[in-house]
Image (cartoon, rainbow, N blue to C red):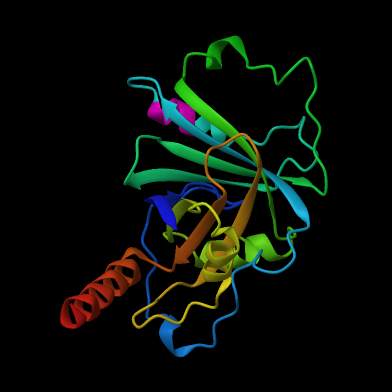
Amino acid sequence: MKSITTIIAISLFSLLPVTFVQGQGSPKSAASEKRPAPAGAGKRTDVYHVHFTKAALGKAVQLGDWLKTPNPNTPMPTHFIVLRHQDGDAWDYVVITHLGTKATVEAAGTPVPPDKRDLSAWHTDTFVNGPSWEEFPRAMGIEGDSASKTAGSVYSVSYYRPAPGHREQLEKMLSEVPSAAGDTTAGNVLMQHLEGAAWTFLSIARYNFVGRLCHGREKRYSADHEEG
């Protein structure tokens, strides 16, 4: 099994005004709570569009502002999340848009306003299947009132390609309930490629704030170091 890469991202769109402030207070330890399986580990009933994009030089802010603007031409204009790259890969933003239970591609394509065409240096588009929209925002912390409570959440985005003959094993591993020592994720989503990319699975892990991500990494590193 081969993990292509892992990226850390911060939420830029939560169906509420954007904030870069880290969450305050003392959340209950995620490690002490009963963990559900990743959303999408069982039935993947809905189609999503995954858009990775790199901003043109000096255009990251403008590109982010545009990506956060709901597209009235999509089936459900408010059903999307934008993550801003922080560490780990070449892209600047990933936009995950919910399309419902099916998606179509028109010959006319998706028109880009003339003043937005030069905001992106490159992008990739992939269709995936994933959990229902009822499950997705709950796992990502953008459901209703929870969006304001999860401002400052950090997300780890990973995509995977199985070694030949090991697709089922990889999917089984990614579908397991998080149980590793030091795991501090607050929500997880698993999606599967349909069309458009070289990877097979996309997973997104949400951490309530960056400290939990770092703490979890430190504990896993310590355990690996002791065992090795």
- In the picture as drawn, the residue positioned furthest to the top comes out as 114
Task: Give the main secondary structure of the magenta stretch.
Answer: helix
- List x then y, in percent, for residue 46: 76, 53
Look at the image and say whether residue 92 sits in the magenta stretch. no
**Residue at left 54%, top 17%?**
116
Quadrant assignment for the C terminus: bottom left
Q: Can see residue 143?
A: no
Where on the picture, by quarter, is residue 111? top right
Is residue 119 shown above or below 80? above
- Residue 62 located within the stretch drawn in magenta: yes
Q: Quadrant of the N terminus?
A: bottom left
Q: How many marks?
A: 0
Q: Is residue 176 left or right of residue 157?
A: right
- Does residue 208 appear to the left or right of 221 in the view shown? right
Find residue 207 and report its horizontal and vertical position in percent. Answer: 43, 67
In front of the other: 13 or 101:
101
Q: Residue at x 46, y 38 (%)?
A: 93
In this view, the residue in front, 212 or 36, is 36
Q: Residue furthest front?
A: 165
151 lies above or below 81:
below
Residue 186: x and y in percent read: 49, 72
Q: Is residue 223 left or right of residue 51?
A: left
Q: Which residue is drawn at the image coordinates 54% and 12% (left, top)? A: 115
Residue 226 higher or lower than 55, as above or below: below
Magenta residues, start to end: 60-64
Residue 147 visible here: yes
